[in-house]
Image: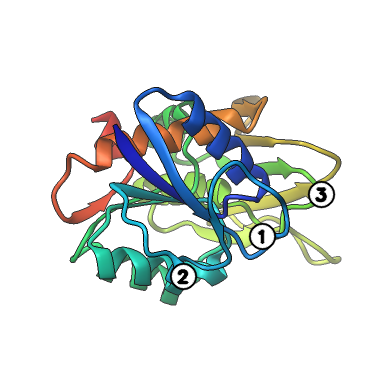
Amino acid sequence: MLKVIVNGALGKMGKVLTRLITEDKDLELVCGASLNNGEKTDFKLYSKMEEINEKCDVVIDFSHHSTLDDVLGYCLKNKTPLVIATTGYNEEELLKIKNASKIIPIFHSSNMSLGVNVMLRLVKEASKVLNNWDIEIIEKHHNKKVDAPSGTALMIANAIKEVLPSLEYNYGRYGREAKRSENEIGIHAVRGGTIVGEHTAIFAGPDDIIEIKHLAQSKEIFASGSITAAKYLVNQKVGYYNMDNMLG
């Protein structure tokens, strides 16, 4: 049985994740950590990872980028594999993750959905063929989401840029001189209601438009994906892994 600790256990995603772990006969929820730990839970709960003395086989992080040092500290100290599904990291924080992956196995993805990662592959293929078309990305999320654009929107943009490295990102448009340049990917964020997650990559050519779209209908797809990643990661050597590695 795989022993799991969840960081961000009382967040919206954390609650879904802890429920799925308890329902999985192959998993054991050892405990959780959450800055907001006032709620009663059926499992042991700490406010920070550094307070945890229990050991586990893998940590799954669905928290906030500000807790990165805390979760890395626990995992490095205990040599524990880490699945990171949190978004909003800056370049310095991403470097910390990469450096930590030289000591422990780390699986890092801004989106744990299988469907989204298939979408990334389709976007790359479209970029190869439609390399002179205008490309725009629109992402939609609920009104409580903090970071913008979403980590998934950036994953899509980065996938396109792997194929077309000369393109630059334009985060929305505003003003009287906002004409689209030929050398850009437009990235736009919408926030409203309880939208779980919607991402669209638009390829617009002369009299021709192709849209590649992914719609998340529940948070379970992300939690389930992180569990699959955890089961994969515990069998890997030290290193940095993502969905491409797991999906082959």
Q: Which residue is mark 1?
A: 37
The disc labelled 3 sits on which kind of residue?
Asn
Q: CA distance from mark 3 to mark 1?
A: 23 Å
Q: Secondary structure at mark 3?
A: loop
Q: Secondary structure at mark 1?
A: loop
In the image, 36: left or right of 162? right
The residue closer to the viewer here, 130 or 82, is: 82
Give residue 66's position: percent from left, percent from top: 56, 71
The alpha-carbon separation of the residues under discs 2 and 1 comes to 13 Å
Classify mark 2: helix, strand or loop: helix
Identify the residue shown where x is 72% and y is 41%. Answer: 140
Q: Residue at x 32, y 45 (%)?
A: 242
Q: Which residue occupies the extreme bottom position in the image? A: 92
Horizontal arrangement in the rendering, residue 167 relative to residue 200 (left or right): left
Residue 215: mark:
none
Instruction: Estimate the x, y position of residue 72 in percent, counting from the top left.
Output: 37, 68
Whichever of labels 2 and 3 marks the residue nearer the N terminus, that label is 2
Q: Are marks 2 and 3 in contact (CB under 8 Å)?
A: no
Q: Earlier in the sequence, mark 2 or mark 1?
A: 1
* Disc 1 residue type (three-letter): Asn
The residue located at (69%, 49%) in the rendering is 40
Residue on which disc 2 sits: 51
Report, in whole angstroms, how far the alpha carbon at label 2 lies from the one at label 3. 32 Å
Badge 3: few (under 14), some or many (20 or more) residues near its Cα, within 10 Å? few
Q: Nearer the viewer, residue 46 or 132?
A: 46
Residue 110, image x, y percentages:
49, 49
- Quadrant in which the C terminus is drawn: top left
The residue labelled by disc 3 is: 143
Residue 195 left/right relative to 3:
right
Check the image and report above or below for 60 versus 244: below
Crowding near pointer 1: few (<14 within 10 Å), some, many (20+)?
some
Q: Quadrant of residue 26?
A: top left
